[in-house]
Image (tube, helix red, strand yellow):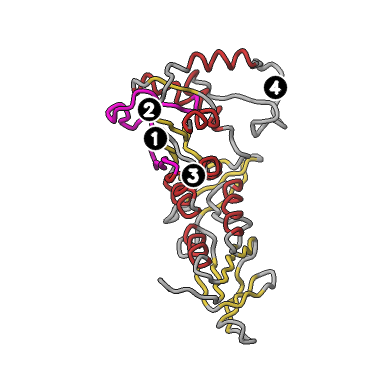
């Protein structure tokens, strides 16, 4: 249907990468699109909070979502409404002129196991792999979202392998904390860290995404950059998977129009930024702020994303 526009009904079965991309492409060409997925979210390999962002985008562009409802049968249309009927296990019927099945899904993709009260997902040698938080995994414990930025900064600066934050880390409601060392952090402590990590004043380059930016973080950054122009170059480090989705959602284009770019499967620490002429880098990551001076010979401007962007707009 390349180059065609129409008002026909299309049912896309399977909300993987191919399914989501197909749904967006078709609805942009005025087709009435329903996306059917047997699981309760689109893009099953990614975390729910990231899937929510994509689902909101799909709805905004007119894609109808039928989640948590697998296909039971395909039958010829009985009432002339479309060429075929897609019948789901819940009993819903979606008439269609065209049905597209998401060919990116394997028949046996991954399995879940419960061991000692802990839940694990294990990839079954699928062609496309099992992905968690933008990273391909062979086996992964399913827990609530990890505090990645804090954990990465602590590991980079002090080799902290394990920590507990009341009310924040996944085990907070069941962990026994008696006898553990406790640390309190106040504004004075934070100011001292910022002062220590800041060694530069006027950055040549802004970099976000250390650890790699999630889809949600990319969408939030795009919203902050919409309609604006940066006076300094900006890199957003992320996984190839997130970069692909961000392009489909239009967020990559928004970031690029503002003067930024998405960089996939690498980061500023291992990139040859000193050979590219950069001397001072602005980051919102404690991990990056620790690594850049020693690994890349860079001066660092360390601050919040909002503060760094505000300075870059002036």
Could you tell me which residue is drawn at 60 percent across and 14 percent down? 189
- Give the number of the mark in front: 2 or 3: 2
Mark 4 packing: few (<14 Cα in 10 Å), some, or many (20+)? few
Q: Say which residue label 4 marks.
A: 177
Q: Is residue 195 above or below residue 234?
A: above
Q: Nearer the viewer, residue 255 or 130?
A: 255
Q: Do the numbered discs 2 and 4 sit on residues whose CB atoms are within 8 Å? A: no
Q: Do the numbered discs 3 and 1 sit on residues whose CB atoms are within 8 Å? A: no
Mark nearer the N terminus (2 vs 1): 2
Mark 2 vs mark 1, CA separation in Å: 7 Å
Position of residue 297 measured from the top left corner of the image (x, y, whole percent): 34, 20
Mark 4 vs mark 1, CA separation in Å: 45 Å
> Element under label 1?
loop
Residue 204: mark in rendering: 2
Q: Which stretch is magenta?
A: 258-286
Mark nearer the N terminus (4 vs 3): 3
Q: Say which residue label 3 marks.
A: 134
Mark 4 vs mark 3, CA separation in Å: 32 Å
- Give the number of the mark in front: 3 or 1: 1
Q: Say which residue label 1 marks.
A: 233
Mark nearer the N terminus (2 vs 3): 3
Position of residue 16 measured from the top left corner of the image (x, y, whole percent): 51, 58
Mark nearer the N terminus (2 vs 4): 4
Asked where in the image residue 278 lies, by quadrant, the reply is top left
- Give the number of the mark in front: 4 or 1: 1
Could you tell me which residue is drawn at 61 percent across and 77 percent down? 95
Of all residues, the one furthest to the front in this rendering is: 314
- Give the number of the mark in front: 2 or 4: 2
> Element under label 3?
loop
């Amino acid at each position: 249907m390349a180059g065609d526009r129409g008002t026909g009904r299309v049912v896309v079965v399977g909300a993987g990468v191919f399914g989501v991309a197909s749904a967006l492409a078709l609805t942009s060409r005025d087709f009435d699109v329903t996306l059917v997925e047997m699981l309760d979210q689109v893009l099953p390999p990614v975390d729910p909070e990231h899937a929510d962002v994509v689902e909101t985008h799909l709805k905004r562009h007119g894609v109808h979502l039928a989640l948590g409802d697998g296909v039971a049968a395909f039958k010829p249309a009985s009432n002339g409404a479309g060429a075929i009927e897609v019948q789901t296990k819940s009993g819903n019927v979606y008439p269609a002129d065209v049905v597209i099945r998401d060919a990116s899904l394997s028949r046996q993709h991954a399995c879940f196991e419960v061991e000692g009260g802990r839940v694990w997902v294990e990839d079954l040698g699928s062609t496309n792999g099992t992905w968690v938080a933008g990273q391909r995994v062979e086996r992964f414990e399913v827990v609530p979202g990890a505090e990645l930025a804090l954990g990465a900064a602590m590991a980079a600066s002090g080799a902290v392998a394990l920590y507990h934050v009341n009310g924040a880390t996944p085990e907070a409601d069941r962990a026994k904390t008696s006898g553990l060392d406790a640390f309190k952090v106040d504004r004075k402590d934070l100011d001292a860290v910022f002062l220590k990590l800041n060694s530069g004043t006027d950055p040549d380059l802004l970099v976000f995404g250390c650890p790699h930016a999630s889809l949600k973080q990319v969408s939030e950054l795009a919203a902050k950059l919409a309609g604006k122009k940066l006076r300094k170059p900006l890199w957003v480090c992320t996984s190839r998977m997130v970069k692909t989705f961000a392009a489909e959602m239009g967020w990559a284009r928004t970031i690029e129009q503002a003067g930024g770019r998405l960089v996939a499967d690498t980061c500023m620490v291992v990139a040859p930024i000193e050979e590219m002429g950069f001397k001072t880098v602005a980051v919102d990551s404690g991990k990056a702020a620790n690594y850049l001076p020693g690994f890349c010979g860079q001066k660092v401007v360390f601050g919040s994303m909002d503060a760094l962007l505000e300075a870059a707009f002036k």
